[in-house]
Amino acid sequence: MKAKELFVALINASEKAANIARKCRSNQHLFSLLIEEKTGDEKNDRFFHDFKTLADVLIQETIRYDVGKLFPSIKDSIKGEESHGFENVLGEKVIIEIDDNRECTFKMLRKVLDSNDEAAKELTNEIFKVIDTEVELSISDDEEIDFDIGIWIDPIDGTAEYINGVDELTEFSNIQKSGLQCATILIGVYNKSTELPIIGVVCSPFAAKDDDDYVSKIFYGISLNDIKYSNVQPRVNSRKIAITSSSELYKCKSFEVAMSAGAGYKALKVIEGDADIYYLSKGSTFRWDTCACQAILRALGGDIVEFKNSIIEKQPIPLKYPHNNEDKCNRNGLIAYQDVNDFYKLLEDLSDAI
């Protein structure tokens, strides 16, 4: 498998995903019909309400379809956060599946949307639209991925922010506490043998506005063999900033602390250089939350490591992605950084955390 071809496919898939996310949200009446609350094993116990939207499921299955069509050998290794079942307003359970039959996809969406032909047609058009994002990758056309890989997708990380869309700023430049910018699309590729991420694509569908329409910003990176490449030019920040969730109990004295929503967004702030470190002591993130961002950070010389074991061992212990392990939770928490010196500085602050 050519690394460059896979990379381009993932970037294109992320932009198509962003188009679907924006399309689903542009009509508020339609959007209100497309939300259901997760229950049982799907629910994240950390949140009182944990919703999924048709956009989540549709994005996940579209990425799986597009990438799996180009690379059939890895289709069964493309996993996502969401189950592909969705319940419409009439209480009917619909399985979201996409294949080459455009008419079948339209009928499936029509059923989800309670016979709304116009909306079903619009979403079908987005699913089958050809996306060709213009990117320049400093990777040889001949670079091969000659080992088994898996892919983790988080179709919309920060679903609550995507649903609510209420912007709230922090006192720190370029860091939001909540809002649409905190919603991200995450696609991460990992090596099944080493269990480490190698390619990451993070798309921010609501990064900016062009006239009245939102436009994406896409971040990507690869850490493969001797290749360390990313399109990110991190900003230089004069303040030492740690970013975490509002539920975090442990405080650090060497950093100013920003509170924000969305695991992907918080890791992205470290990638962009707006925060020096992201830490979370609780096991409330999952592999789909971290794989993409970890790959980009590894391309930049950083990493995402386990919170608990790294503190115990007093050294970075990277998050890993065992392919056949049923437990998808990052149970030991996490610490994300670009500069390992910031990791050790945080380590001193949190030496009594375990």
Image (cartoon, rainbow, N blue to C red):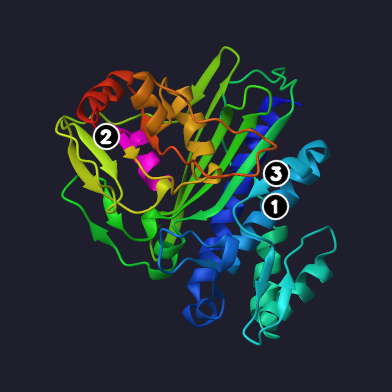
Amino acid type at mark 2: Ala
65 or 322: nearer the viewer: 322
Seen from this angle, which residue lies furthest right? 101
105 or 56: nearer the viewer: 56
Question: Which dot marks residue 130?
Answer: 1
Residue range corresponding to the magenta coloring: 264-278
In the structure shown, which secondary structural element does the residue marked by tag 1 occupy? loop
Residue 268 placement (x, y as % from top left): 39, 40
For the residues labelled 2 and 1, the Cα–Cα distance comes to 50 Å
Residue 271 within the segment the image draws in magenta = yes
The residue tagged 3 is: 78
In the structure shown, which secondary structural element does the residue marked by tag 2 occupy? loop
Residue 310 within the segment the image draws in magenta = no
For the residues labelled 1 and 3, the Cα–Cα distance comes to 21 Å
Residue 17 placement (x, y as % from top left): 59, 54
Q: Magenta stretch mostly in which secondary structure? A: helix
At x 21%, y 31%, the residue is 237
